[in-house]
Image (spheres, grey):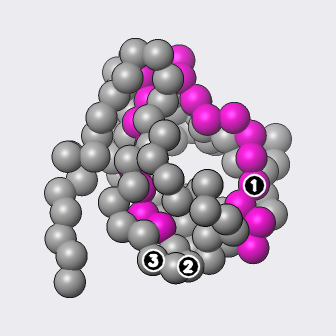
Amino acid sequence: MKKENLTSFQDFNEERFTKRVIHKTDDSTAFVLNFMPGQGVPTHTHPGSDLYVTVLQGAGTLTVDEVEHTLKKDDVVFTEGHEAFAFTNTGDEPASLFAVLSKVPDERYAKDQ
């Protein structure tokens, strides 16, 4: 067993979003994405994977396959790897997303940024 506290992974940077890996196995990873207002992660896919996201704090716009969705604290989202995914913090306060990526498509998806 490994136990962590999510708040210790809520690490914000004024210049760019941050990604903090919590757990990593051979085929999955759990991490927290942190965004200051206006920051985002560009459109991308997770080939062969599933992505589960929970909003820990803040709000923003999730775009999946070019359709925008408003997200807020406690919202939970599931996307399949072929779906094009982007997120932008469109709120006035920092936003954090807890994410689990199953079947990691390649090592760069499981590293801190």
Is the residue 94 above or below the residue 82 in the image?
above
Asked if the residues shown at circle 3 and circle 2 are in contact, with their CB atoms under 8 angstroms apart, the answer is: yes
At mark 2, the secondary structure is loop
- Magenta portion: prevailing SS class: strand
Q: What residue range appears in magenta?
A: 29-48
What residue did someone put label 3 on? 25
Amino acid type at image mark 3: Thr
Nearest the camera: 12 or 26? Answer: 26
What residue did someone put label 1 on? 45
Question: Where is residue 85 shown, x and y percent of the image?
Answer: 70, 48
At mark 3, the secondary structure is loop
Q: Within the magenta stretch, is there residue 30?
A: yes
Residue at x 36%, y 67% (from the top left corner): 23
Please tell me in which quadrant of the rendered image residue 10 appears. Answer: top left
At mark 1, the secondary structure is loop
- State the separation of the CA atoms marked 3 and 1: 20 Å
| First in sequence: mark 1 vs mark 2 | 2
Is the residue 42 above or below the residue 100 in the image?
above
Question: Where is residue 53 shown, x and y percent of the image?
Answer: 49, 57
Amino acid type at image mark 1: Thr
Amino acid type at image mark 2: Asp
Q: Is residue 44 left or right of residue 54?
A: right
Asked if the residues shown at circle 3 and circle 1 are in contact, with their CB atoms under 8 angstroms apart, the answer is: no
Q: Does the rendering let one see residue 85? A: yes
Q: Within the magenta stretch, is there residue 59?
A: no
Residue at x 59%, y 57% (from the top left corner): 109
Question: Where is residue 5 shown, x and y percent of the image?
Answer: 17, 57
